[in-house]
Amino acid sequence: MSEALTLDGKSAKDIIEQVKHYLLSLQDNICQTLELADGKGQFVEDSWVREEGGGGRSRVIKNGAVIEQGGVNFSHVFGSQMPASATANRPELAGRNFQAMGVSLVIHPHNPYVPTSHANVRFFIAEKEGEAPIWWFGGGFDLTPFYPFKEDVVHWHDTAKKLCAPFGEAVYQTYKDWCDKYFYLKHRDETRGVGGLFFDDLNEWGFEKSFAFMQAVGNGYLDAYIPIVEKRKENQYSARERDFQLYRRGRYVEFNLVFDRGTLFGLQTGGRTESILMSMPPLARWEYCYTPAPGSAEAKLTDWLKPTNW
């Protein structure tokens, strides 16, 4: 069926292979670069097959010199029908087979002065014989510091701004605002971190430009994150900073289990649970009615957890 359907003059089959090739290469590049930045840890690959169709390769790094635990996952899943939750919001997807592929990563460092980071890029296509395919790209990256440095946050956003610039004057601000809105814990009245980029349902530019933007975001993650890691990984810290890091990691867990669309989609489509929940920190803690000391560095984090034009 895919051979007959075209996007920008290419068959859907060729497009799927083109995107898949990029995503596999991206996974390789990110893992290799993070290993170099860590200096000790190495990713271990775990390939898996999804019974309903598709599979992936999950790569996890543990107990490195810098990275306490992190994962960089590639998945390519497909099926004959979408879950009911998806077609309820997108009825045009009913009766179509689908393919979804992407690279998703979360890095949880040991050092509380090195921020947690997240990124993902993804492609979705749904087909039905005799009709044009429905497709889109999505993705982004965001930063979750525990002890923020303004120069790091500005660098993160400047990198995002520069990669968006070739695609339109308003692109950065649009997707930056979307990120602030998406990574928001309503029950805590705070953002998950200091934001970045978030986009979804991107197809209005046509395939080639939309694909180019997804690649710019995927490639831009390392440009945004590695300089921060290199700058902060030798910072000294005590048990106080570590305890606060573990407490704030609890917010990460809350978001991923309550709000994250990717987690929900993966579980509802029968994805591999271990890979879907790879984003969880290895250690986290909760404390009833915790309040940091007034004027402390921990108390000042609250000032960063709101939408800000950096």
Image (cartoon, helix red, strand yellow):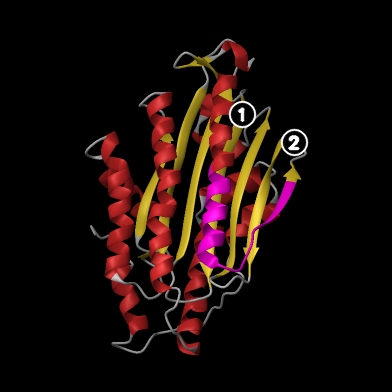
- The Cα atoms of the two marked residues, 1 and 2, are separated by 12 Å
Which circle marks residue 52 in the picture?
2
Residue 256 appears in view = yes
Q: Position of residue 90 (x, y in %)?
A: 50, 31
Q: Callout 2: 10 Å neighbours few (<14), some, many (20+)?
A: few
Q: Which residues are magenta?
A: 26-47
Which circle marks residue 98 in the picture?
1
Q: Is residue 34 magenta?
A: yes
Q: Position of residue 169 (x, y in %)?
A: 21, 38
Please tell me whether residue 310 is drawn above or below residue 160 in the rendered image.
Answer: below
Quadrant placement of the N terminus:
top right
Q: Callout 1: 10 Å neighbours few (<14), some, many (20+)?
A: many
Q: Residue at x 34, y 55 (%)?
A: 180
SS at mark 2 in the image = loop
Give 45 or 32, whichever is nearer the viewer.
Answer: 32
The amino acid marked with disc number 1 is Phe
Quadrant placement of the C terminus:
bottom left
The amino acid marked with disc number 2 is Glu
